[in-house]
Every structure is written in C-alpha cells, then in structure tokens.
Image (cartoon, rainbow, N blue to C red):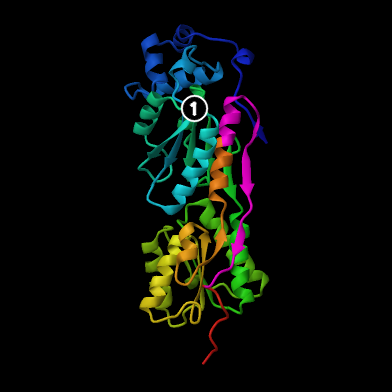
Amino acid sequence: MLLAMRDDEEMGRITLAQVAQQAGVSISTVSKVLNGRQDVAPPTRVKVERLLETHAYRRTTRSAREAPLIEIVFHELESIWAMELIRGVENVAKAHNAGVVLTESGTRHSPSPDWMEAMLQRRPLGVVLVFSALPSEVKQQLRARSIPFVIIDPAGDPDPDVPSVGSANWNGGLAATRHLIECGHRRIGIITGPEDMLCSRARLDGYRSAMTMAGLEVDPGLILFGDFHVEGGYDRATEMLSRPQRPTAIFAGSDLQALGVLEAARVHGLRVPHDLSVVGYDDVSIARWASPALTTVHQPLRQMAEEAAQMLMRLRAQEPVSTRLELATSLVVRKSTAPPPPEG
C-alpha cells in the first residue's frame, strides 16, 4: 500500500476564517488548535482538526516559519541503539541541509500533550517516532498541520495508514535459535523485550518456530520477558540460571540484555561459551568488544533510520511511500556460542 500527502491544489485552498466559520468557532480558537494549545475543549479541537485535515489546510507563510529540522522522538535516550538511529537520520538531514532535534517523550509508547505543543512551536520538517503506537488524535493533529511522520519499529501491529520501518524480527529470532540448535543445544532459554512490543513478540515467535521445526519441546519456564536493558538481562538470567534444570544456552532480545546474561553467568561460576552459550540481538558496537565477543543478530538500525527519514522527505515532496518497509536481519557468529558441555 502506498501513501502520499495530499496536494493543496487537489483539495482546494481554504482560509483560516472559513475553517472557523464551518466549525462555528472564533478565528482565535482555530489558531490555538493549529498551535497545539491545550486551552481548547477536546470536542472543539477534534471538530477543528477534522476540518483542517479534510481541507488540507496549510498556512501560506509556513515555509518561512518552518524550522529546517527533523525531529526524532524516543521514549528513552539512554541506549546504545538510539545513537545508531540518530546517526541514520542525521545522514539524511545533512543531505537536505537540515538539522536534527531529539525529544524524549517520557511516556511508554505515545507522545505526551506537552510534546505536541512544543513540537508545533518548533514546526519541524517532519517527525520520526521510535517504538510508538500513535493514538488517532495525535495522527489527526499532525495531519491537520501537514507535518509528515514515520514510525521506526511500531510498538504494536503496523497501522495500515501510517508509514513505518522495521526489520525482520521473526527471521532474526529463528536464525539465532537455529544456530544454537545446530551447535547441539536442546535446553534453550529466551529473554525477550517487553511483552506489549511487536518486535519482542516477533523474536519470540521466531524462537518458538525454530524449536518446533527441530522437534524440541518449548519449556514455558525458559521464556522470560525483559526490558532490553543490562539490568533486566542480568535479573532474568539469574532467575533462569537458578532453576534446577538450567538452560545450556540463552537467546537475549538485545545486546544489552546479553551483557547482563554474561554477568549473571560469571556470578554463577559459568564460563561462556564452555558452560553457557549466549546470543544477543542488534549487533551494536559494544557487542564485538564484550568478553567473549558476542554472537548476535545484526539489525540494520542506521539503515532503518535513514529509510524513515527519506520517507519523510518523500512525503514532504508529495511522493508516494510504502506503508511498511521491513529490512533484513543476519546472524553474526563470534565467540559466545559453542556446543553444550557433556552431560554428567
């Protein structure tokens, strides 16, 4: 499916006064809605935004006031993979003589009303959101102001009317687990990300598929959800390694989680990979410098961000874009995986 921003000439120009007249409100109220002000009653805001979107209203002076910026919205910035995404967007921004502004939304998956108001004051060229699930009212507010937006790794199932970029997470989970099976492992644990995130569930489904295709039993006790961070990986691995029948291998849903698994193994007196094999996910720069160097699934984070930013620029040029772009993942074998220790 292809999407494109609507052309003003196709929809016909409409003035701010005409929008106000059709909505039955004052011009100042329409102006407040356009600027993201919060002192407008929700029903009034919805009515005005629908009219703005229907008529593809644009300020005639917008280009003069618009900031040459691409805005990236994270729910948290304290992550190595965030830097890869930032670099990808920066590469495209530089090619278009634009800068990048970073925003931490402070909420789990959806930007806060405070962010919306501040963003509308900045008037960026477009917005890239990471791990988001946009409520309909946020999409409507952005579209009513002709601000294009793209989501990297949507939190839930990709919305058919929202452009998004992701990676082949199911394939990644499958490849990681198959590698461990081919090494000879049969008791394989998985520590994935938050249960409500699409990428976490897809990696888990890939793990389950690999186990099932190999005729191996999936032990529910060896499936744990985490938070993609080192501490969470350590805590979940500690729980898993304390079981009477511990796994001989653990597939972690991120490289940061895998670092936590390596530390938990050390605390338990286990040598990696002699006593426990570990596979990560993302292939961030620190993975190759871990001890031992981490076998992981390469996720093309920088390319994902570049594609998202290029989608924004195509939308601004009113060119069609795909609603969903999924990039390939690949297994990178290093030193943290090996055959399991002999039984007994």
Q: Can I make out residue 133 in this image? A: no
Image point 41% across, 22% down: which residue?
45
| SS type, badge 1 | loop
Asked if residue 312 is among those painted magenta in the image, a careful observer would answer: yes
Q: Among all residues in the image, which is located at the extreme left?
A: 39
Rendered view: 279 above or below 171 = below
Identify which residue is drawn at 52% across, 45% down.
154
- In the picture as drawn, the residue positioned furthest to the bottom comes out as 344
Residue 19 versus residue 39 in the image, above or below = above
Snapshot quadrant of residue 181: bottom right
Which quadrant holds the N terminus?
top right
Q: Quadrant of residue 65?
A: top left
The residue that disc 1 covers is: 125
Residue in the image at 36% along x and 77% along y:
267
Q: Residues within 10 Å of mark 1 (few under 14, many from 20)?
A: many
Query: In the image, what residue occupies the spot 59% across and 40% down?
Result: 307
- Decide which of 24, 125 is in the foreground and name it: 125
**Residue 51 sits above or below residue 99 on the image:** above
Write down the region rendered in magenta.
310-335
Could you tell me how many numbered marks the image carries?
Answer: 1
Q: Is residue 322 covered in magenta? A: yes
Q: The disc labelled 1 sits on which kind of residue?
A: Leu
Which residue is at the front of the view, 281 or 96? 96
Residue 52 position within the rendered picture, expressed as x and y whole percent measured from the top left? 50, 18
Query: Can residue 113 be seen in this snapshot?
Result: yes
Residue 282 position within the rendered picture, expressed as x and y whole percent measured from the top left:
52, 57
Q: Position of residue 192 (x, y in %)?
A: 48, 61
In the figure, is residue 260 to the left or right of 128?
left
Q: Where in the figure is residue 139, as x and y percent of width and height?
A: 49, 31
